[in-house]
Image: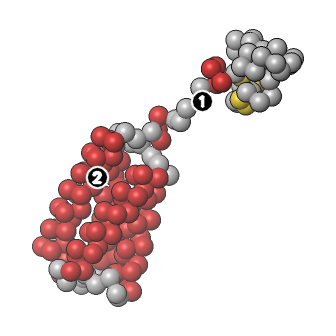
Amino acid sequence: MCLLHPGQETKLRCSKCERPICAKCMVFTPIGSRCPDCASVSRLPTYTLSLMGAAKAFGAGLGTGLVLVVLWVLIGWLLKLMFPIYLVSLAGSGYIIGESISLASNRKRGHWLQGISALIVCFMFGLLDIINVISITTIAGILGLILALALSLSRFR
């Protein structure tokens, strides 16, 4: 008889503890069929993010984004003189933000960190557009934003 469903006959057994289990309570694992107690499948620690970890990541990303805004205000005019350097430095800003968030979250990965990263990159570009350092409506601004988002988000896949 099944351990969790006493009226259910079964010939299946948990591959770890050898207790009888029925098809309703059986959990498929990479190692074999297990009872719900032995399966206890959890997410990988690399993808588990606590609320405090998310707050640290957001704070680090926001701080880095604000420092980059100040740098763009100070030397942005110089970077505009050469288009390739301009695009590389815009994309590099996204990479730097992604890297700071990754370091603050102890190299974790996942959708939450991608969202935080995208939010901060868009905030930085919006702030730079408001200050009139760059223009998001130009081809260079759009390409820079796309490259910055791609580099920032690639840190958390």
Residue 34 image position (x, y, % from top left): 71, 22
- Compared to residue 66, the image places residue 126 above or below, namely below
Q: Which residue is mark 2?
A: 58
- Compared to residue 57, the image places residue 69 above or below, namely below
Colour scheme:
secondary structure
Task: For mark 2, give the secondary structure.
Answer: helix
Residue 115 image position (x, y, % from top left): 40, 58
| Disc on the earlier residue, 1 or 2 | 1
- Compared to residue 3, the image places residue 68 above or below, namely below
> Residue at the location (45% across, 39% down)?
48
Quarter placement of the N terminus? top right
Residue 12 in sight here: no
Q: Residue furthest top?
A: 18
* Gap between marks 1 and 2 measured at Cα: 29 Å
Image quarter for residue 120?
Answer: bottom left
> Residue at the location (17% across, 80% down)?
131
Direction from residue 52 to residue 155 in the image, left or right: right
Residue 28 in sight here: yes
Task: For mark 1, give the secondary structure.
Answer: loop
Nearest the camera: 69 or 51?
Answer: 51
> Residue at the location (53% across, 36% down)?
43
Query: In the rendering, which numbered label is found on residue 41?
Result: 1
Circle 2 Cα neighbour tier, 10 Å, few/some/many (<14 / 14–19 / ≥20): many
Nearest the camera: 92 or 11?
Answer: 11
Q: Mark 1: which amino acid? A: Val
Nearest the camera: 70 or 92?
Answer: 70
